[in-house]
Image: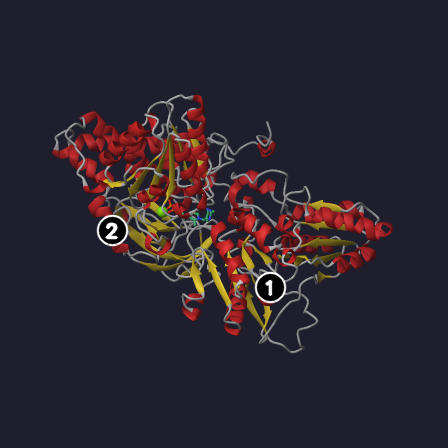
Amino acid sequence: MAARKSADKKPSKSNTSKEELLDHYREMLLIRRFEEKAGQLYGMGLIGGFCHLYIGQEAVVVGLEAAAEEGDKRITSYRDHGHMLASGMDPKGVMAELTGREDGYSKGKGGSMHMFSTEKHFYGGHGIVGAQVPIGTGLAFADKYKDNGRVTFTYFGDGAANQGQVYESFNMASLWQLPVIYVVENNQYAMGTSMQRSSSTPDIYKRGEAFAIPGEAVDGMDVLAVKEAGLRATEHCRAGDGPYILEMKTYRYRGHSMSDPAKYRTREEVQKVREERDAIEHVRELLLQGKHASEDELKAIDKDIKNVVNDAAEFAKNSPEPAVEELWTDIYA
Amino acid sequence: MATEVLMPALSPTMEEGTLAKWLVKEGDEVASGDILAEIETDKATMEFEAVDEGIIGKILIDEGTEGVKVNTPIAVMVEDGESVDDIAAPAANEDDAKDSAPKETDRPDGDKAPAQPTRQSAPPETDIPEGTDMRSTTVREALRDAMAEEMRADDTVFLMGEEVAEYQGAYKVSQGLLDEFGARRVIDTPITEHGFTGLAAGAAMGGLRPIVEFMTFNFAMQAMDQIINTVAKTRYMSGGQMSCPIVFRGPNGAAARVAAQHSQDYAAWYAHVPGLHVVMPYSASDAKGLLKTAIRGDNPVIFLENELLYGQSFDVPEMDDYTVPFGKARIWREGEDVTIVSFGIGMKYALEAADALAEDGITAEVIDLRTLRPLDYDTVLNSVKKTNRCITVEEGWPVASIGNHLSATIMERAFDYLDAPVINLTGKDVPLPYAANLEKLALVTTKEVIEAARAVTYR
Ligand SMILES: Cc1ncc(C[n+]2csc(CCOP(=O)(O)OP(=O)(O)O)c2C)c(N)n1
Ligand SMILES: [Mg+2]
């Protein structure tokens, strides 16, 4: 077992097909436009409470979903809209949950942080930092128990990586060789606390070493690098070799939630990442340079996606509030 | 096509804000992500970004304007080539947000915006010397002042928690403390509640007096074992040799639409535990006086605050050393017909109900318990003996609630005085839903208090 750092290696782009690149482009753009719209609806008071946007981190879920197979599971924190869209959940149902309406995935009862889909094997949507990590480990336990060849993608943040239950999970996952991929979405901040101010050592991917879990750091802004790392990890898990850690070096462009005064980082820092490392821009360039798509074709895709998102927003505005009886349902079987 | 830029809601509790500064001017071209303006919310100054690209056609609200309601058009954006002169009256808003948005009055906090400080005064405490000046202070400031005063007085007192130092507190309660006391005494922790709670227990055994801020009490569940099994029991288990004088404080209870995992009232949970003191203030003066008592005391204290109350203003006495003792309820208003017992944000509903009842000639005696452990039974019992009726109001769940405990006590000790069964008003027996309409139904309301008061007075 060895921790390695694949962020340094250039991912091979030669064997990536045009269709694949276009798919990545579409999926990432869908997440971004969806999140921008969610931000807008929040500003208008149509979405309330906490709302954590995924803008900037799109390549992580899109790349890993490209490495997933039907039946694989995923679980994450409250910053979950991107994961749901990438897993194939309906933007309309997600947006309607954000507005707290009847047609939302949780009938309006869960909200932004708490959505689930049995059909898409999406296990939430968790508000307590770190709590999804043992749960994801348990999903993998069930898969191993059933011997069904499935893996579970368990996503958590750099801040969550300091919760004790993460390491309790690592130990059990390694001890019992569970098919779980721990995906650390290291966007460098936990609310206003940078990695350096919260973590004694900088490399989260190495934290499995003590438990004999291999890990690697990945450029989480490069969807192709993410996908390749995802394939290595799933292969490892499916071969019965136990858990795997992927530390995705990524960045969140927006505030932690909607009410974030953002005094902990400079405007320039954000701008620099947006300009130099943006995941969508990167694929856009590959498409144009490789002559896989013309500006006009990409514009048409943009337009399609805007329509999908606008439709979702319209749907979410017009869906009725849940019936008052719903207050008392779904508490017991 | 011209689009209006609307005053955004930038926090779960924001209903209006100050348009502090425009960072663009009319005619400027903006891209998505550019900062348009700085807006002051109830919690902080925030940058407001453009969502779409376009040109600033017209600025409708001048910078420096206060009290701009969420959703008010503040500017108009036009597309390239469009003339600013083409803009019709800003009423041409093609967005139907206003129609389909849940109505303002549907908000769980009712018609009173929590961000809008309302000035309220309680009857003076007997121990405030006559002629003492009173200063209108928010609960948020009162808590900070209490910590600062105690930290000045005792070097062993320190504050730790997530985002308490550099960020100035997730809810800005610790504003300025890092500047005054430095990083040795105001400490940002990693997100590791069980760990730092245990660490605080050890630090307390080692002679320090930690104040531990939980970003919200929902996250204290991660630390429940250390709180109950170590902190509450150390004095007893060590035969009195050592103890854990820690103050655990932070917001508790529902805020505004933050859903099931972030909206719970833990008053009854902690009140169950021998070895803990449990405090839940309503007013700013109580918040200050009780927090000072908590920090000085030799027992562990669970200090339950409320996000919706942070911005509310109350009169606080200007005294060098204002403390409020534990175990002493405060009678907010005297009455003859019914006793309403509450604490924390429940007091808001109790007092509003008392106002409404007074108009109909029913006088309610409203008691704020202030501390749940120790609990001032005598004040409640004496009142019930006078009014012969009692209702209790709290936000937590109904089973094994504080109200249940009070009812039992009243039955045991004042049975013959009762002219009606005691009614316990609580949150509904459900996890808190996100949907605006359901959330409102799940929480206790002023209307329910009024109805209960009518029921026990048979009026
Ligand atoms: C146990 C717990 N403690 C604190 C919080 C409050 N909180 C919510 S998100 C967050 C920061 C988490 O940062 P990170 O894990 O890096 O994820 P990111 O938000 O960057 O995606 C904090 C402190 C919480 N929800 N749960
Ligand atoms: Mg993070």
Q: Residue at x 22, y 30 (%)?
A: A300
Q: Is residue A108 left or right of residue B62?
A: right
Instruction: Look at label 1 and name its amino acid.
Output: Ala
Q: Residues within 10 Å of mark 2 (few under 14, many from 20)?
A: some
Q: Is residue B128 left or right of residue A135?
A: right
- The disc numbered 1 marks a residue on which chain? B
Residue A286 visible here:
yes
- The disc numbered 2 marks a residue on which chain? A
Q: Residue at x 48, y 54 (%)?
A: B196
Q: Is residue A114 left or right of residue B124?
A: left
Q: Which residue bears the numbered disc 2?
A: A271
| Front position in the image: A106 or A277 | A277
- Quick check: marks 2 and 1 in contact, CB under 8 Å? no
Q: CA distance from mark 2 to mark 1?
A: 46 Å
Quadrant location of the C terminus of chain A in the rendered image: top right
Q: Residue at x 28, y 35 (%)?
A: A29
Residue B94 visible here:
no
Q: Residue at x 26, y 46 (%)?
A: B54
Instruction: Look at label 2 and name its amino acid.
Output: Gln
x and y percent of residue A282 in the render? 20, 39
Examine the rendered structure and indicate whether residue B89 appears above or below residue A300: below
Provide the secondary structure element on which disc 1 rests. helix
x and y percent of residue A114 in the render? 47, 37
Report the label total: 2
Q: Which residue bears the numbered disc 1?
A: B294
* Disc 1 CB within 8 Å of nearest ligand 1 atom: no
